[in-house]
Image (tube, helix red, strand yellow):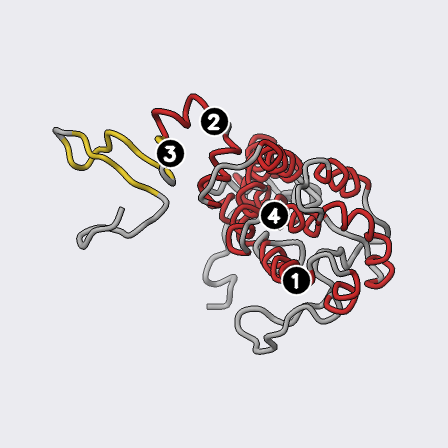
Amino acid sequence: MNNSFGYKTKIWFEEPESDNPFAARKSYCHGYDVYGDILSKATWFEYLYLLFKGEKPSPRQAKLLETLALALTNLGPREPSVRAAMNGGVGGATHAASLMSALSVGAGQCGGGHEVYILMSLWETCGLDLGLWLQKLHDPVEDKREDIWKPMEHAPGFDPNGVSCPTPVKQTLSALARYDENGCLSFLEETREQLEASTGIPLSMTGVAAAAFHALELDAHSATMLFLILRLPGAAAHAIEQRHLGWKHFPFYGAHIELTEDAAHFELPNAEELGL
């Protein structure tokens, strides 16, 4: 779609209905008929890859993206972005507000989207060179000018609060490596212990996700967006659950908020009692 009166995009093209120029008769994503072909012939992950990458994935790439999505779908209440959505849900916030809470908390550079962005740059620089990784992980950001992001305080892709690599992280890395076509996930699996020894902290799920996005040949912007999107289902489910459970069953609230008097019989002090 490219004309002087409309948006310019290489992603999408539409043919209007004959009786309504504001309704599409056919929609094409990177040349593929979305409702005529993709809808009946493609999987969600094939379409997702096409949308972000601009080309049809191989079967292994589609399976890699699907497996990564399964791993990220719900990281549980320990994950800060999920917990943020839970706070929104239990407080009665709108559904959009709960999701925005998850996005905001999950966008940073400690287990969040910006950490993935930094890692994608490191993958472009270091590739499968262990020596470069050992060097760069200790000084990952070349541009030292502070903007909205402060300097990294830990090696990106590793958990600054961790002790040993969690079992789900190792399981996810192993599962993803089976579909890796360029070797970076296998490289990470083989060198994990050396990288952990160098950084002094264990590999995180963020580090595994970034390696998978690099294996899928996605750029840093696409990887960051997908990392944020793929974690939202779990945040949404937990927010809804906490909304139903209510604040009395929520940590830090229910156990510490108790009415000491019956509010129905409580009388406000008058002006004389207040010394006015």
Q: For the residue carrying disc 3, how many other residues have a C-alpha within 10 Å: few (<14), some (14-19), or many (20+)?
A: some
Instruction: Give the tally of numbered discs.
Output: 4
Mark 4 residue element = helix
Comparing marks 3 and 4, which lies closer to the viewer? 3
Residue type at mark 4 is: Phe
Q: For the residue carrying disc 1, how many other residues have a C-alpha within 10 Å: few (<14), some (14-19), or many (20+)?
A: some
Specify the label residue 252 is tagged with: none
**Location of mark 3 (residue):** 32
Mark sitting earlier along the chain (4/1)? 1
Does the CB distance between marks 3 and 4 fall below 8 Å? no
Residue type at mark 2 is: Ala
Q: For the residue carrying disc 4, how many other residues have a C-alpha within 10 Å: few (<14), some (14-19), or many (20+)?
A: many
Does the CB distance between marks 4 and 1 fall below 8 Å? no
**Location of mark 2 (residue):** 42
Q: Residue at x 77, y 38 (%)?
A: 174
Q: Looking at this rendering, what residue extends furthest in the bottom direction?
A: 145
Closer to us: 248 or 49 = 49
Q: For the residue carrying disc 2, how many other residues have a C-alpha within 10 Å: few (<14), some (14-19), or many (20+)?
A: few
Image coordinates of residue 241 in percent, x first then y, are 59, 32
Mark 4–mark 1 Cα distance, whole angstroms, equals 12 Å
Q: Looking at this rendering, what residue extends furthest in the left direction?
A: 19
Mark 1–mark 3 Cα distance, whole angstroms, equals 33 Å
